[in-house]
């Protein structure tokens, strides 16, 4: 029988750990070489050495684990993660929503509005031709706005499906995210879409102007007992809901924040920590991947870095809404100072909108419990 001895001289704790891990790594390599050379000759040794190698590998993982001290330390493959059989059903449901996201963004990006035509109609109330021109231009725009709003409802349901999968016992949030990377990637894609949508929406004031004109005109025509075909598409109830949606500065983010809060409220048997830990873990993973060259170098595109930054900001905002104390409190499981620093280390043009999102769309930033240095970093 073979015996292995690790002879380690007295050292400082961190150096001792480093040397011990080095010995174990060397031992694993030795076992691999030994198996390759000798098991074909002596198959009975296979079980013994494979078991020994497995135990050494687990020991090395435990010894080098930094999750308890520094947060989760694993790579989320935002570029290539594919669903396992266990993820497939939820992944298909969510994918049917996400596959329309680029068309939604394209439609919003190409939204031109009817500002001039509306101004002409308002300034010349007796000119029926100008009234008709403005109305005929606004109606298709309102149908487009309904499409965006309806997509937000589908996105809300997709988010809830992912939250169910990524927070359910007995696995921890870290285990869920590490083992169900395709679902984690979809969660990230929802947040990425959401911030992109809201960034675009904030640059298009015509949306609210067009919709306000539509509602005023509908009300006036209803008083005159005129039947309008568009009311079959956008009735009064739908118009009210759309009005609340577009009144928000960041309507998609507000939708997801409400959805996450409702998910926690509706699932009373699920501990709040399951949801907040899922969000804080994803924020921590994104931060580590952004600040660690070993991880960020694995991305094949620079766009993935921006993707990762948007996701980090998105989960911080959700955490801030869901957790009673918010994301900025000293008790928060999110390293806000580290997250903000990661953003500020990027080119200003890439992160201005994200820093503004943390400043203006979070719930607890201006609480008295927020450390002054954190608040100062976002000034």
Image (tube, rainbow, N blue to C red):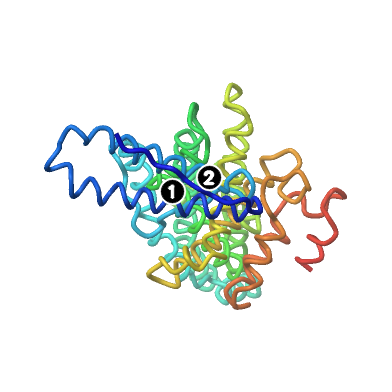
Residue corresponding to mark 1 = 24
Residue corresponding to mark 2 = 63
Q: Nearer the viewer, residue 289 or 348?
A: 289
Residue 28: image x %, image y %?
36, 48
One can see residue 332 in this view: yes
Q: What crowding class fits label 2: few (fewer than 14 Cα within 10 Å), some (14-19), or many (20 or more)?
A: few
Q: Does 28 appear above or below 110?
A: above
Q: Nearer the viewer, mark 2 or mark 1?
A: 1
Q: Residue at x 58, y 54 (%)?
A: 314
Residue 158: image x %, image y %?
44, 42
Q: Secondary structure at mark 2?
A: helix
Q: Residue at x 61, y 62 (%)?
A: 208
Q: Does 288 appear above or below 241?
A: below
**Residue positioned most to the top:** 269
Q: Residue at x 49, y 30 (%)?
A: 168
Q: Do callouts 2 and 1 mark residues in contact (Cβ within 8 Å)?
A: yes
Q: Residue at x 45, y 54 (%)?
A: 75
Residue 226: image x %, image y %?
52, 50
């Amino acid at each position: 029988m073979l015996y292995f001895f690790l002879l380690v001289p007295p050292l400082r704790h961190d150096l001792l750990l480093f040397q011990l891990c080095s010995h174990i790594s060397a031992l694993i390599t030795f076992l691999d070489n030994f198996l390759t050379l000798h098991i074909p000759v002596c198959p009975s040794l296979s079980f013994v050495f494979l078991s020994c190698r497995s135990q050494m590998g687990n020991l090395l993982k435990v010894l080098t684990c930094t999750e308890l001290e520094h947060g989760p330390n694993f790579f989320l493959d935002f570029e290539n993660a594919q669903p396992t059989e266990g993820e497939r059903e939820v992944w298909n449901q969510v994918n049917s929503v996400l596959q329309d996201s680029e068309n939604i963004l394209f439609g919003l990006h190409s939204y031109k509005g009817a500002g001039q035509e509306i101004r002409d109609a308002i300034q010349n109330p007796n000119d029926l031709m100008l009234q008709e021109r403005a109305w005929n231009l606004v109606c298709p725009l309102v149908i487009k706005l309904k499409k965006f709003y309806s997509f937000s409802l589908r996105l809300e349901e997709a988010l809830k499906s992912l939250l169910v999968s990524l927070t359910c016992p007995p696995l921890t949030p870290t285990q869920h995210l590490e083992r169900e990377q395709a679902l984690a990637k979809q969660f990230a894609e929802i947040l990425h879409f959401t911030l992109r949508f809201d960034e675009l929406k904030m640059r298009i004031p015509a949306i609210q102007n067009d919709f306000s004109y539509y509602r005023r005109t509908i009300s006036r025509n209803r008083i005159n007992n005129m039947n309008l075909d568009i009311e079959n598409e956008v009735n009064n109830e739908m118009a009210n809901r759309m009005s609340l949606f577009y009144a928000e500065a960041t309507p998609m983010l507000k939708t997801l924040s409400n959805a996450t809060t409702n998910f926690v409220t509706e699932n009373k048997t699920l501990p709040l920590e399951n949801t907040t830990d899922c969000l804080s873990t994803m924020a921590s993973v994104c931060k580590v991947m952004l600040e660690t060259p070993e991880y960020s170098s694995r991305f094949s595109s620079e766009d993935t870095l921006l993707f990762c930054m948007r996701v980090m900001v998105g989960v911080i905002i959700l955490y801030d809404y869901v957790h009673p104390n918010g994301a900025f409190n000293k008790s928060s499981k999110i390293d806000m100072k580290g997250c903000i620093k990661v953003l500020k280390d990027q080119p200003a043009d890439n992160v201005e909108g994200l820093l503004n999102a943390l400043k203006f769309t979070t719930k607890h930033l201006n609480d008295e419990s927020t450390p002054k240095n954190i608040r100062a970093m976002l000034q």
